Image (tube, rainbow, N blue to C red):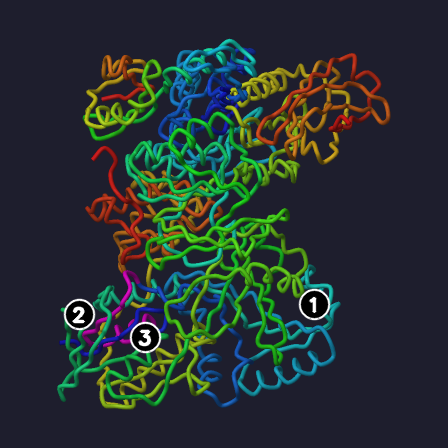
């Protein structure tokens, strides 16, 4: 069986062809770089996504956040539910861990927030 | 007298400031209307920025932060909450803020980095009622990502540019239901990966060759009529379809904000809606430079930063009086290539010319001619309107050249 | 108990309220919408007509000419932008020229001064961008342009400065005559008044029926408009009409007082008094029609389009009368209603006196109002002084129109107080520029929420269900 994917690793968006036999990946083609192959393998075995969203701060403002690593795609809405309930303490620096180990990744701030 | 005034503290303005500083100009002021540096990047909380520039994937705020930190570390003067009201040909900048009132700065050089705005509903001539619930995608992005408010619950998006796609995902993540993304053209002008991760991941239908023909609802939007369009982009009556929704987001193109530029009489391109510039990004008004989305709309912020570096360096050379202009090589295009930046070359040195095409083409050559003589030919497997192409011309190629024509040739 | 209740807070109701507020009267202005100036007042040609259109001897003719003469002083007193730019009715052939001659005669009979027929060369001298096919024109030096909702808001503000009251979201559904006074009901609310003035626009026939007057009806006539970017505002300087023909009055092209270019209106009768939608047919034809009278109207400079409903009465003239006691109709005020508004107010006051209302002038009525544009019209030194005293004047909120936070706060705190986004737009021009609120509307929502102390979710675009925010995120 063959699967066609669009690579999301970079803005190029290569069209990837994955040759599959059952769950085993026989080959990946169409990728321009090694990350394309990685993506294809991951997408066919355990798809993951980096989640970017916002979190409420104690002063009511929002801070933008992301998962430090991609998390399982099927866990995106579960992760959001946790992030949406969390209130971040101030001050916040870029890279501060606001929630640790959420589905295998940290949730880190992507902007500064002063008190 | 200030050496360099930079109008706009977004990615272009910050990068131009750093570049000028590093090229020896220390007397710089950045005028930014918002209360922080970063421009529109601050509301672009998604990732995908910085792969060219930093070899890693950053979110918009992170990308902005790197530049803002550098501006701060270099001690470059920044005036926040400051709006430029007017500029003059002799490089006086009139601005206002709450602390200083309306004030004037005499600059030796100016870099225009005001960015762009979204094409608004009114410009789209959509028939029907005038209810609430219609937003440009960037306005919705600001409301959701910065202010923390969801503008609506059932969404239709017109326009499949990257902002439209990104907002489809964003609204979904915040609990809204995106019913469709309509695109007038037979292809999306957004990146393939955004169609994948913003629409396909959430089963949001992309309706190519479709547009919104009518708005319904007298108070809040109650629905839109969409229609398939023919090859001349005219709606087909038989294909009318009503979609109930309370919100319509418009992602229908960006327009460089050149009101200040027009005021000083700088020549504008009717294709880019930005200034006509030379290889240093100097406009037709001496000492006034332009870069970023105010010059032409970019697909990647990395290219904005790159272009702003050129403008910053150009401005520094202008201020120091060391730019050696002599040539005047005009660049024309064939139409398949919509435009180039720069449009003029005024110095015979190595120059990278950026260009954008008008359609998706496969197996093409970008040919550069000096009259009938082929100066350079570059093969491309695929070119698309969403992606900017770059062609490097060396100083030697420009020897004896009076004008250049860029032509896209399809291989048989 | 009010002495006089005015139903309808448009430009006519507003001007009448202002005039009455100079006298010792307790006045209330009722408006069914969430803000004033919400009917035909916010969507018309924004023209002060010279007065040659209306039939000789008609009320329209008399009040138009008088209103047009009064307008410069009224605008000055109220701080409303008014530009006496002159108008030009253009013709394309000999038949049109004959029509222009008769228009000129009619105008002179109506008392319009300075009318002149111009040939193409003379027109080109004053309007170099006139359409290629234009052969002749009727020039009216007294033609002018004004901002109609600015006039209505300012007139009502002035009336309120003199003590008049305004009640929005009060849709009169029943009127009861108790002999000595009337009771006016709106759902669960009611007020009483000795006199009623009906200025309910397209709904004025409905109001008249409530007091037993069914001698006229008013039907809505749709008029669609296109508004172009300020870049196009100087293509022409005069208001350009086309010669009226059997096909109707035609499309006008005019600069606005704010520097935009306005094209319109169409004229299509409708049954539906709530139908302000724009049509595909309009977008397809409007530019071509406009280009017949004015060359070089660019195609892609539209910033918005809208539709207004004119009140076309069954008699062909304005209907200003008193069919029952202590009650006055001011109905069927279609074009030239805006031009006539000051004269209508004067005339209505005389009519009220004649039916028994006693008018005693206040000792020191306020007749002037500080312009809503006082900040932008100030000199540099004045602006800096104002910014020092109030730093919010130094913060630009609407970048397209250069509107400051201070101006928006002024508008929110000043009568008649706006409570929705469109109300801010009409008073300050914030959200009215080329990006149509793309950048500033989130800030305007914030300011309204803060000042009125209501949550974002309760802010509307124009009252009713026109909410702009569904919910706060993370909740």
Q: In this orientation, which residue lies closer to the viewer: C108 or B368?
A: B368
- Tell me which chain the residue with mark 1 is part of: C
Could you tell me how far apart the alpha carbons at marks 2 and 1 are, in whole angstroms?
A: 56 Å
For residue C184, say whether it is visible: yes
Tell me where the magenta segment starts and ends, as one range: C13-35
User: Do badges 2 and 1 share one subunit?
Assistant: yes
Residue B101 in the image, given as x and y percentages of width and height: 38, 36
Residues under numbered marks 2 and 1 in contact, where contact means CB atoms less than 8 Å apart: no
Look at mark 2 in the image and give the residue it sits on.
C187
| In the rendered image, the vertical position of residue C121 relative to residue B225, given as above or below | below
Mark 2 surroundings: few (<14), some (14-19) or many (≥20) residues within 10 A? few
Residue C386 in the image, given as x and y percentages of width and height: 34, 43
Q: Look at the image and say whether residue C19 sits in the magenta stretch.
A: yes
Look at mark 3 in the image and give the residue it sits on.
C200
In the image, taking residue B412 as reference, residue B216 lies left or right, namely left
Quarter assignment of residue B285: top right
Residue C289 in the image, given as x and y percentages of width and height: 63, 64
Picture residue at 26% right of the left edge, 70% below the top: C365
For residue B3, say whether it is visible: no
Instruction: Please give the label number shown on residue B314.
Output: none
In the image, taking residue C365 as reference, residue B217 lies left or right, namely right
User: Do badges 2 and 3 share one subunit?
Assistant: yes
Q: Look at the image and say whether residue C455 sits in the magenta stretch.
A: no
Residues under numbered marks 2 and 3 in contact, where contact means CB atoms less than 8 Å apart: no
Could you tell me how far apart the alpha carbons at marks 1 and 3 are, in whole angstroms?
A: 40 Å
């Amino acid at each position: 069986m063959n699967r066609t994917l669009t690579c999301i690793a970079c803005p190029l968006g290569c069209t990837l062809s994955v040759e599959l036999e059952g769950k085993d990946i026989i080959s990946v083609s169409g990728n321009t770089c090694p990350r394309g192959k990685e993506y294809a393998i991951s997408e066919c075995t355990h798809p993951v996504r980096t989640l970017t969203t916002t979190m409420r701060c104690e002063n009511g403002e929002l801070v933008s956040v992301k998962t430090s690593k991609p998390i399982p795609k099927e866990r995106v809405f579960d992760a959001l539910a946790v992030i949406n309930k969390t209130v971040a303490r101030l001050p916040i620096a870029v890279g501060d861990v606001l929630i640790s180990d959420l589905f295998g990744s940290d949730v880190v701030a992507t902007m500064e927030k002063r008190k | 007298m200030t050496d360099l005034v930079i109008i706009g503290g977004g990615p272009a303005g910050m990068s131009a400031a750093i570049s000028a500083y590093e090229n020896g100009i220390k007397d710089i002021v950045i005028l930014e209307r918002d209360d922080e540096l970063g421009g529109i990047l601050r509301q672009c909380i998604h990732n995908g920025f910085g792969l060219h520039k930093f070899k890693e994937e950053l979110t918009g705020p992170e990308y902005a932060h790197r530049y803002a930190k550098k501006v701060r570390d270099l001690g470059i003067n920044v005036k926040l909450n400051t709006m430029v009201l007017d500029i003059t040909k002799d490089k006086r900048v009139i601005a206002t803020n709450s602390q200083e009132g309306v004030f004037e700065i005499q600059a030796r050089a100016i870099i225009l980095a005001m960015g762009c705005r979204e094409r608004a509903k009114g410009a789209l001539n959509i028939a029907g009622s005038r209810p609430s619930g219609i937003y440009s995608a960037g306005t919705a992005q600001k409301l959701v990502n910065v202010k923390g408010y969801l503008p609506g619950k059932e969404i239709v998006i017109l326009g499949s540019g990257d902002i439209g796609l990104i907002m489809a995902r964003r609204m979904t993540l915040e609990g809204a239901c995106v019913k469709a993304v309509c695109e007038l053209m037979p292809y999306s002008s957004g990146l393939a990966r955004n169609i994948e991760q913003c629409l396909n991941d959430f089963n949001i239908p992309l309706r190519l060759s479709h547009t919104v023909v009518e708005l319904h609802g007298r108070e809040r939007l109650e629905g839109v009529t969409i229609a398939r369009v023919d090859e001349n982009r005219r709606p087909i009556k038989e294909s009318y379809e009503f979609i109930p929704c309370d919100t319509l987001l418009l992602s229908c193109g960006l327009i460089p904000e050149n009101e200040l530029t027009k005021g000083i009489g700088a020549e504008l391109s009717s294709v880019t809606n930005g200034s006509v510039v030379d290889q240093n990004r100097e406009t037709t008004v001496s000492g006034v430079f332009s870069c970023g989305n105010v010059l032409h709309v970019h697909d990647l912020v990395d290219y904005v930063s790159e272009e702003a570096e050129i403008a910053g360096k150009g401005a520094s050379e202008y201020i120091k009086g060391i730019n050696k202009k002599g040539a005047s090589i005009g660049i024309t295009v064939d139409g398949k290539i919509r435009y180039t930046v720069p449009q003029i070359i005024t110095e015979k040195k190595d120059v990278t010319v950026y260009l954008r095409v008008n359609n998706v083409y496969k197996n093409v050559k970008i040919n550069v001619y000096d009259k009938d003589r082929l100066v350079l030919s570059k093969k491309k497997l695929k070119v698309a309107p969403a992606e900017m192409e770059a062609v490097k011309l060396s100083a030697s190629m420009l020897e004896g050249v009076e004008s250049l024509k860029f032509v896209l040739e399809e291989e048989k | 108990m009010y002495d006089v209740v005015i139903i309808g807070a448009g430009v006519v109701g507003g001007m009448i309220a202002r005039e009455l507020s100079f006298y010792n009267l307790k006045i209330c202005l009722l408006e069914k919408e969430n803000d004033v100036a919400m009917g035909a007042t916010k969507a018309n040609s924004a023209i002060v007509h010279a007065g040659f259109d209306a039939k000789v001897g008609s009320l329209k003719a008399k009040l138009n000419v008088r209103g047009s003469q009064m307008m410069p002083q009224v605008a000055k007193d109220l701080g409303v932008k008014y530009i006496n730019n002159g108008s030009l009715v253009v013709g394309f052939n000999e038949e049109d020229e004959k029509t222009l001659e008769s228009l000129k005669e009619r105008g002179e009979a109506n008392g319009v001064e300075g009318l002149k027929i111009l040939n193409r060369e003379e027109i080109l001298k004053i309007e170099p961008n006139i359409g290629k096919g234009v052969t002749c024109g009727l020039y009216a030096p007294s033609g002018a342009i004004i901002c109609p909702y600015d006039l209505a808001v300012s007139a009502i503000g002035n009336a309120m400065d003199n003590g008049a009251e305004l009640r929005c979201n009060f849709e009169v559904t029943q009127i009861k005559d108790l002999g000595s006074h009337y009771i006016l009901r709106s759902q669960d609310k009611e007020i009483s008044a000795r006199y009623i003035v009906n200025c309910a626009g397209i709904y004025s026939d409905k109001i008249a029926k409530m007091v037993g007057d069914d001698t006229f009806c008013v039907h809505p006539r749709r008029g669609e408009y296109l508004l172009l970017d300020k870049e196009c505002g100087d293509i022409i300087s005069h208001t350009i009409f086309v010669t009226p023909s059997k096909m109707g009055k035609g499309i006008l092209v005019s600069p606005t007082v704010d520097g935009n270019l306005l094209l319109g209106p169409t004229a299509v009768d409708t049954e539906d008094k709530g139908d302000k939608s724009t049509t595909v047919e309009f977008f397809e034809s409007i530019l071509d029609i406009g280009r017949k009278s004015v060359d070089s109207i660019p195609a892609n400079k539209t910033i918005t389009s809208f539709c207004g409903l004119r009140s076309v009465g069954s008699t062909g003239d304005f209907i200003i009368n008193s069919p029952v006691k202590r009650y006055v109709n001011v109905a069927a005020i279609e074009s030239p209603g805006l031009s006539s508004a000051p004269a209508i107010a004067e005339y209505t006051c005389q009519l009220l006196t004649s039916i028994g209302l006693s008018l005693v002038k206040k000792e020191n009525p306020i007749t002037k109002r500080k312009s809503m544009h006082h900040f932008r019209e100030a000199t540099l030194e004045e602006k800096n002084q104002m910014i020092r005293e109030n730093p919010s004047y130094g913060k630009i909120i609407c970048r397209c129109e250069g509107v400051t936070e201070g101006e928006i706060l002024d508008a929110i705190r000043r009568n008649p107080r706006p409570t929705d986004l469109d109300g801010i737009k009409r008073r300050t021009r914030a959200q009215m520029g080329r990006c149509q609120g793309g950048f500033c509307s989130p800030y305007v929502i914030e300011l309204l929420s803060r000042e009125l102390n209501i949550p974002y979710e309760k802010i509307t675009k124009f009252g009713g269900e026109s909410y702009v925010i569904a919910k706060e995120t993370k909740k």
